[in-house]
């Protein structure tokens, strides 16, 4: 995907592999807690369980970007919104 987008823009649209690795390391414990909480909620009765399951899924999905920002901060790259130029070969 990066090679195809490089023809259109020189702005780096994807985070580097090491930042993504750290992001996934941060998200793994949160994923396990979400799985555990989902199993505790179960699906009975549906009118109570459905909103709780949606809240769990939305909360986990919302953690992805802050985890990536934290990973970039730990790696010393600063803000993701700073334009990073891609070297053209």
Image (cartoon, helix red, strand yellow):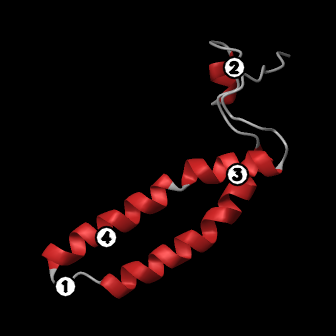
Spatial CA distance of label 3 from label 1 is 37 Å
Depth check, front residue: 41 or 86 = 41
How many C-alpha atoms fall within 10 Å of the one at disc 4: few (<14), some, or many (≥20)? some
How many C-alpha atoms fall within 10 Å of the one at disc 1: few (<14), some, or many (≥20)? few
Image mark count: 4
Spatial CA distance of label 4 from label 1 is 11 Å
Instruction: Kindly check if marks 3 and 1 are in contact, taking CB atoms under 8 A apart as contact.
Output: no
| Lateral position of residue 68 relative to residue 87, left or right | left
Q: Give the secondary structure at mark 2.
A: loop
Which residue lies under the disc numbered 1?
44
Specify the label residue 71 is tagged with. Answer: none
Which residue lies under the disc numbered 3?
70
The numbered mark, 3 or 4, whose residue comes first in the sequence reads: 4
Which residue lies under the disc numbered 4?
53
Which residue lies under the disc numbered 2?
11
The residue under the point 47% across, 74% down is: 34
How many C-alpha atoms fall within 10 Å of the one at disc 3: few (<14), some, or many (≥20)? some
Instruction: Kindly check if marks 2 and 4 are in contact, taking CB atoms under 8 A apart as contact.
Output: no
The numbered mark, 3 or 1, whose residue comes first in the sequence reads: 1
Q: Say which quadrant the C terminus sits in.
A: top right
Residue 87's spot in the image, x, y percent?
84, 19
How many C-alpha atoms fall within 10 Å of the one at disc 2: few (<14), some, or many (≥20)? some
Spatial CA distance of label 2 from label 4 is 37 Å
Spatial CA distance of label 2 from label 3 is 21 Å
The numbered mark, 4 or 1, whose residue comes first in the sequence reads: 1
The numbered mark, 2 or 4, whose residue comes first in the sequence reads: 2
The residue under the point 29% across, 71% down is: 52
């Amino acid at each position: 995907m990066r090679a195809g987008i490089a023809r259109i823009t020189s702005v780096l649209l994807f985070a580097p592999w090491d930042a993504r690795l750290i992001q996934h390391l941060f998200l793994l414990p949160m994923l396990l807690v979400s799985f555990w909480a989902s199993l505790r909620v179960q699906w009975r009765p549906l009118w109570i369980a459905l909103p709780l399951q949606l809240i769990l899924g939305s909360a986990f999905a919302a953690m992805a970007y802050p985890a990536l920002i934290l990973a970039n901060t730990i790696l010393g790259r600063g803000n993701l919104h700073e334009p990073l130029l891609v070297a053209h070969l």
